[in-house]
Image (tube, grey):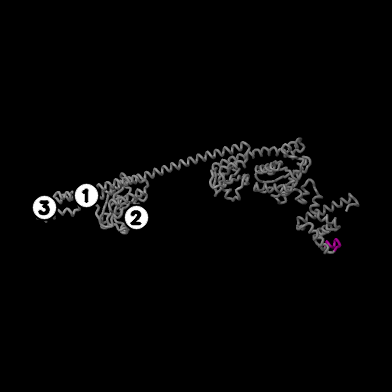
């Protein structure tokens, strides 16, 4: 019969089948001693069966742990590692739920990291303070804990929010083991059932073994992630260094191109072309007054000029929207500003281009100042020493023909002397004339042309804008005569400027011709006939052609204090005739002829005309009309 039990063990029969031999012996009428012997054999066989089953289960567990270790070693993503650990724990212990909490060093508690089999959102968002609940106790003591009925177990410090989450999940039996790295607990691995169930020591050991593998896998995944991060940082640093090197090399090449252009005599336009060729976009170069020297980027607002000021203060490029702005100053004064419209460009190249443009402008300014000194010395000699020999030859070497019509312009100002002198020198260079500074508040120009009044007005307006303070200009024509006439024209132009200031017209420009009767006082030529013709010529010509007496009527009208009726009495004509004649005068002289200043000029012209007419009759005799 013992052989029968061995056969049952060999085929891994169930425990119930081990009762078969005893039942058969009793049915065959075996004596009690034989029955007792069979009972003993059955007990031993069941013990062997239980031992074999435990060993088989242990072997299965070890195999599962080995497989788990292999699976974890193959994983590289931390999230995948954690999910694999929790899922394998649930499989090995055949529980309803498995989950893992990890330690949060910033908050000092543990939080739910991964769950498998969970159905409660509150449970998945649960946080456990150290020592609170079963999981908190495991994390605090680094010791495994299990309970067959969590809510009936008084060993744990129950917290309301924890118990609510556990109830919502429906958990009853819970087992938790620490995840340890050395002496440090990094989390808790837990398995739980929704019905009461004791956890045997073998299950605790199994979960602890899995937790040990899990802790190592987690640490490996962390180290791998840190390594990846470090490699990515190194890769990024390498890319940044390479890009920086390429940018420096490209900037150096652009700088070499710009330097080569300058050495070959290139200008700012050529430098701008190099910048746009390398960086793309559109580039504008502005001078110290914000005027475009090269290129055009459209209308610029005040913010752009604020950015240019910031660029000069910082010594680097400033971005404003899609504009890159690099500005250079000398001695605190702006020299040039480069404005590049581009979405993405190398700021170093723009900064180097700004320096090259600044050097070009400084060179041009130095050349202009040197040429300006030569031109200024010639103009000083024309004014102060008109009889000096060789003045005309010196002018020809500068590209001027003093035999052609010129205009002397004298500008009075109260601004910066250096800025005014630079403006005058620039005007002289552009217009092929001469310029000189005389005293602290006066600049003089000798410019080709005949429109003295127009040149004076233009000079006053431009220098006023440059200095941001009123500049007053007087002008006098020289004509195609001797160089000695320049000195006389200078004196007349200066008196015109002083007369404008005395008349309260600072910031304006005019010649003697535009000053009306005042021009007779300040002009050297004293062109009486020109003044009379300009003020009264239309009336005089009308009387001469028609044989009328409009001039006499005007004289009587002003002589009677502007009274038509008294004028009619003096001239022995009807008052309607006076009115008609005055209407005709108004049409000839234009609107505003009775304005006080205009009326004064008309009266002076009438008197000068009468004096001139009388003088002519005395000279010419009966042929004078």
Distance from label 2 to label 1 (Cα)?
39 Å
Rendered location of residue 344, percent (x, y): 53, 46
In the picture, measured across the screen, residue 209 lies left or right of residue 328, that is left
Quick one: label 3 or label 2, which is nearer the N terminus?
3
Farthest residue in the top direction?
389
Label 3 and label 2: CA atoms lie apart by 59 Å
- Residue found at x 34% / y 55%: 126
SS type, badge 3: helix
Whether the magenta-drawn stretch holds residue 571 is answered as yes
Q: In the depicted view, which residue is nearer to us: 602 or 68?
A: 68
**What label sits on residue 314 in the rendered view?**
none
Which of 69 and 445 lies nearest the eye of the viewer? 69
Label 2: which secondary element: loop
- The image shows residue 425 at horizontal and vertical percentages of 68, 41
Q: Nearer the viewer, mark 3 or mark 2?
A: 3
Q: Residue 396, position in %: x, y?
A: 74, 37
Q: Earlier in the sequence, mark 1 or mark 3?
A: 3
Which label number is shown at residue 53?
Answer: 1
* Relative height, residue 588 to residue 409 (above, below): below
With 416 as the anchor, is 394 left or right in this view? right
- On screen, residue 621 versus residue 308, left or right, reads right
Q: Earlier in the sequence, mark 2 or mark 1?
A: 1
Q: Nearer the viewer's eye, disc 2 or disc 1?
A: 1
In the image, 605: left or right of 222? right
Callout 1 secondary element: helix
Crowding around mark 2 (Cα neighbors within 10 Å: few <14, some 14 to 19, many 20+) is some
Identify the residue shown where x is 72% and y is 45%.
409
Q: Main secondary structure of the magenta part?
A: helix
Q: Where residue 489 appears, x then y in whole percent?
A: 76, 43
Q: Which mark is residue 126?
A: 2
Give the residue at mark 3: 36
Magenta region, residue range: 566-573
């Amino acid at each position: 019969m013992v052989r029968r039990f061995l056969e049952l063990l060999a085929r891994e029969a169930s425990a119930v089948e081990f009762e078969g031999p005893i039942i058969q012996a009793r049915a065959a009428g075996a004596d009690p001693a034989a029955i007792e012997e069979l009972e003993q054999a059955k007990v031993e066989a069941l013990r062997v069966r239980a031992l074999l089953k435990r060993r088989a289960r242990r072997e299965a567990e070890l195999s599962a742990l080995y497989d788990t270790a292999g699976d974890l070693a193959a994983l590289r993503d931390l999230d995948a590692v954690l999910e694999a650990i929790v899922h394998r724990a649930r499989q090995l212990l055949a529980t309803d739920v498995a989950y893992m909490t990890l330690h949060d060093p910033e908050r000092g508690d543990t939080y739910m990291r991964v769950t498998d089999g969970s159905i409660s959102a509150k449970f998945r968002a649960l946080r456990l303070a150290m020592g609170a609940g079963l999981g908190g106790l495991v994390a605090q003591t680094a010791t495994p804990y299990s309970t067959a009925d969590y809510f009936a177990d008084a060993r744990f410090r129950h917290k309301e929010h924890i118990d609510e989450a556990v109830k919502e999940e429906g958990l009853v039996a819970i087992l938790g083991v620490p995840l340890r790295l050395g002496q440090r607990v990094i989390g808790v691995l837990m398995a739980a059932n929704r019905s009461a169930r004791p956890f045997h020591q073998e299950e605790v050991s199994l979960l602890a073994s899995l937790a040990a593998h899990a802790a190592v896998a987690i640490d490996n995944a962390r180290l791998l992630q840190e390594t990846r991060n470090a490699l990515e940082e190194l890769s990024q640093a390498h890319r940044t260094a390479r890009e920086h090197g390429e940018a420096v090399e490209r900037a150096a090449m652009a700088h070499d191109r710009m330097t080569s252009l300058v050495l070959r005599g290139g200008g700012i336009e050529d430098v701008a072309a190099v910048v746009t060729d390398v960086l793309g976009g559109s580039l504008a170069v502005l001078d110290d007054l914000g005027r475009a020297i090269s290129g055009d980027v459209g209308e610029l607002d005040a913010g752009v000029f604020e950015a240019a000021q910031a660029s000069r203060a910082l010594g680097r490029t400033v971005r404003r929207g899609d504009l890159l702005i690099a500005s250079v100053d000398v001695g605190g004064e702006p020299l040039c500003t480069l404005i590049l419209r581009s979405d993405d460009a190398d700021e170093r190249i723009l900064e180097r281009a700004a320096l090259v443009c600044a050097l070009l402008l400084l060179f041009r300014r130095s050349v202009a100042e040197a040429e300006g000194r030569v031109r200024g010395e010639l103009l000083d000699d024309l004014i102060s020493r008109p009889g000096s020999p060789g003045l005309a030859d010196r002018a020809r070497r500068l590209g001027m023909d003093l035999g052609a019509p010129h205009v002397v312009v004298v500008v009075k100002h109260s601004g910066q002397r250096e800025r005014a002198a630079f403006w005058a020198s620039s005007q002289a260079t552009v217009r092929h004339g001469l310029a000189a500074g005389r005293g602290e508040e006066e600049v003089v120009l000798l410019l080709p042309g005949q429109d003295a009044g127009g040149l004076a007005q233009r000079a006053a307006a431009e220098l006023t804008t440059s200095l941001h303070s009123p500049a007053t200009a007087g002008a006098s024509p020289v004509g195609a005569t001797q160089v000695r006439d320049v000195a006389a024209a200078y004196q007349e132009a200066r008196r015109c400027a002083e007369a404008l200031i005395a008349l309260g017209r600072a910031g304006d420009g005019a010649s003697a011709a535009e000053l009306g009767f005042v021009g007779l006082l300040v002009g050297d030529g004293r062109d009486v006939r020109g003044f009379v013709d300009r003020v009264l010529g239309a009336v005089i010509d009308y009387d001469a052609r028609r044989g009328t007496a409009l001039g006499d009527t005007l004289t009587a009208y002003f002589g009677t204090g502007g009274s038509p009726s008294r004028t009619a009495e003096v001239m022995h004509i009807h008052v309607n005739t006076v009115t008609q004649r005055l209407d005709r005068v108004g049409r000839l002289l234009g609107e505003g002829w009775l304005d006080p200043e205009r009326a004064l000029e008309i009266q002076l012209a009438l008197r000068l005309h009468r004096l001139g007419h009388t003088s002519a009759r005395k000279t010419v005799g009966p042929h004078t009309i």
